[in-house]
Image (tube, rainbow, N blue to C red):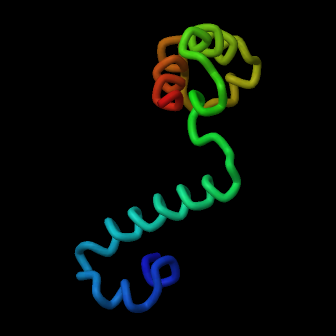
Amino acid sequence: LLLPIAGSDIYARTPEPRRAEQTIHYIIELRKALNDLCGLPINLKQAGVTKDKLHAIAQAAINDPSLIMNPREMDADDALAILKKAFE
């Protein structure tokens, strides 16, 4: 993936064992650039969600009927842990 993302010069200069790491770096940079261009929030905090709402959102998530389609069982603590990661 590094070749089409970063170009032939970067690809050629990057030792083979580091190409995966470099690819991840470029994907992260592309995501940041896209976010800057679009002006969209990148996390819940930037979207205006306050930390005190996370518990209510987690509770609503586990009460959503579509949760039965989730391949993993999830409780409120699991949902809250995901929301906390998405917050920062």
Left or right for 10, reference 46: left
Q: How many labels does the image show?
A: 0
Vertical position of residue 53 compared to residue 26: above or below = above
Q: Which residue, as the protein is rendered here, is positioned at the far right?
A: 65
At horizontal 70% and vertical 11% (from top left) the residue drawn is: 63
Pinpoint residue 87: horizontal percent, then vertical percent: 52, 28
Vertical position of residue 15 compared to residue 20: above or below = below
Say which quarter of the image contains residue 13.
bottom left
Question: In terms of depth relative to the viewer, which is nearer, 53 or 39?
Answer: 39
Vertical position of residue 53 compared to residue 47: above or below = above
At horizontal 38% and vertical 91% (from top left) the residue drawn is: 9
Question: In terms of depth relative to the viewer, which is nearer, 31 or 17?
Answer: 31
At horizontal 57% and vertical 35% (from top left) the residue drawn is: 43
Say which quarter of the image contains residue 41.
top right
Vertical position of residue 41 compared to residue 24: above or below = above
Pinpoint residue 14: horizontal percent, then vertical percent: 28, 82
Question: In terms of depth relative to the viewer, which is nearer, 20 or 27?
Answer: 27
Pinpoint residue 21: horizontal percent, then vertical percent: 32, 65
